Amino acid sequence: MYGEIMSNSLIRQKTYSTALFVLNSTLADRKYPDILIGVLFKKEDFSSSEKAAVNELVYGILRHRARIDHIIEGASSAIISGLVLNILNILRICAFQAVFTDASPARIMNNAVALSAREDKFSGFVKRTVEAIIRNKDTVVFPDKEKTQIEYISAYHSHPVWIVEKWLKEFGNINDVERLCQANNTVPPLLIRANPLKTSRESLQKALHDEGYPSSPAVFSPPGLVVSKKEGIFRTDAFRNGLFDVQDEGSQLITLLTGAAPEEIVIDTCAGNGGKTLFLSGLMKNKGTVIASETNTVKLGNLRRRAERAGAANIKTVDIEGLHEYIGKADCVFIDAPCSGMGVFRRNPDAKWRLAVKDILEVAAKQKEILRDYSELVKQGGRLVYATCTISREENEDVVRGFLDDRKDFYIVSPSEMNPDLFGRFTTEAGFFRSLPHVNDMDGFFGVVMKRKELVD
């Protein structure tokens, strides 16, 4: 069950209308819910409880969409694919409230009536269907778990059938696949990383506690903290003073996998907004150089602003052309490759409904090009670190093995050899790094460290 937000009598009807608008825009126009919600919260006045309710509704429905749709179909004679999207999303909101929250039947029915008030043709249908959902929510029949395992997991744990089938093929164990899909539907914790250029984890923990934000140490990452309260954390003095950045524990470990050290030349080839770049600078103690490259100029601008706040003075941003002068010079090249994002479904649940098989094949082809091209930046004896936030063999193991087949001057260095205490439990038999939501309670990351051989005269 989700929290008690939905029973808060101070939540205005506009909150539910906003959630409906975001769902319609996300599913019809393929827009991103986090961006939509961010814009709406800046334009209109919402209380903290209302903001939490919008997020809970939108992300809860996207996480549990297939399960909710199965419940809706069981409560009416309608076929989901035949319903007008606005009507379907009204039903999804009410079904989510009925199944996943402690909202009263009266509140749910009032919400159904209010949201469908302008839908003259469908208002009666909505009312009857919601009544049936509330009446039958505890007796819903799902596909047989023993006889139709894939269909059951897809419906009950809300993942497209093709993804369940793909993971079954790769994991080979239906129970692991079910646990993974179940974990993907949990609300992820807020993970932050202490900025080693300005503070320690212990000092940051005290500073946040003094500002009303209790936290606990992350299980695996040395600089990580789990913060129990999210609202307003970016308005704290600790954040304004650059003492921390938000970064999932898996992402922190992947950055540590680089082994970045002071005085090195480290190239972050796909820097994005710079979360890992800033950590690299911290690991290097502002000594040496971090070259951050990104095709998106807006993201590079964001990175520079974040670097200034963090006190990361050894970061140099360049475009793709600017990397040419570093061919054969980098101690470490870090490729956080664009990917399908199958490891971060719990943070981006809309992604599992956007993704298609062809997308994985297309991105894998791009990853092979990126790995081939950027490997030329590594000097002899240097490190090449390839990473993704996906759980997909085509984008991970297959890309790396294909590269190593072509480039005999690179070889794998096992993470457990680099730091057995930190990476031992994340190292596969083949020497890859892997974190999984259902195993480690963190995002799903893949990583590999490859070293370039030194030529012998």
Image (cartoon, helix red, strand yellow):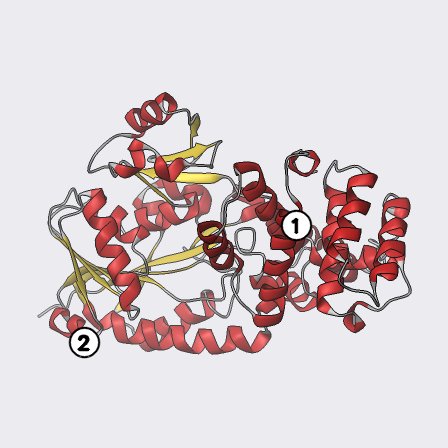
**Callout 1: 10 Å neighbours few (<14), some, many (20+)?**
many
Residue 231, placed above or below residue 396: above
Q: Amino acid at mark 2?
A: Glu
Nearest the eye: 232 or 398: 232
- Left or right for 364, reference 327: right
Q: Residue 219 in the image: state x and y as whole percent.
A: 45, 33
Q: Which image quadrant: the N terminus?
A: top right
Q: Residue furthest left?
A: 457
Q: CA distance from mark 1 to mark 2?
A: 48 Å
Give the label on residue 16, or none.
1
**Callout 2: 10 Å neighbours few (<14), some, many (20+)?**
few
- Left or right for 294, reference 50: left
Q: Amino acid at mark 1?
A: Tyr
**Residue 140 visible somewhere in the drawing:** no
Q: Residue 39 in the image: state x and y as whole percent.
A: 46, 56
Q: Earlier in the sequence, mark 1 or mark 2?
A: 1
- Residue designated by label 2: 321
Q: Which image quadrant: the C terminus?
A: bottom left
Q: Residue at x 27, y 35 (%)?
A: 243
Q: Residue 151 in the image: state x and y as whole percent.
A: 78, 62
Disc 1 element: helix
**Proximity of marks 1 and 2: CB atoms separated by less than 8 Å:** no
